[in-house]
Amino acid sequence: MSESTHRRFFVWVLLAPALLWLLGLVILPHVELLLLSLQAR
């Protein structure tokens, strides 16, 4: 692997958890609302 590829991989390893955490924060409330509305029926 070249130096730039290695650095890019390292950046992705650092960013991936933050991106997943943000996605979780955005998506989880919507999922809970959907489940609650389905249960209310």
Image (cartoon, grey):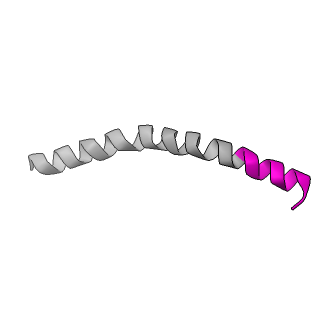
Q: Is residue 2 above or below residue 22?
A: below
In depth, the one of 36 and 14 nearer the eye is 14
| Farthest-out residue, bottom | 1
Residue 21, percent across and down? 50, 40
Q: Residue at x 33, y 39 (%)?
A: 29
Residue 7, percent across and down? 82, 48
Q: Residue at x 73, y 44 (%)?
A: 11
Residue 41, percent across and down? 9, 50
In this rendering, would 27 be left or right of 35?
right
Q: Residue at x 44, y 43 (%)?
A: 24
The residue segment tinted magenta is: 1-11
Q: Residue at x 57, y 39 (%)?
A: 18
In depth, the one of 40 and 32 nearer the eye is 32
Q: Quadrant of the N terminus?
A: bottom right
Magenta run includes residue 5: yes
Residue 22, percent across and down? 50, 38
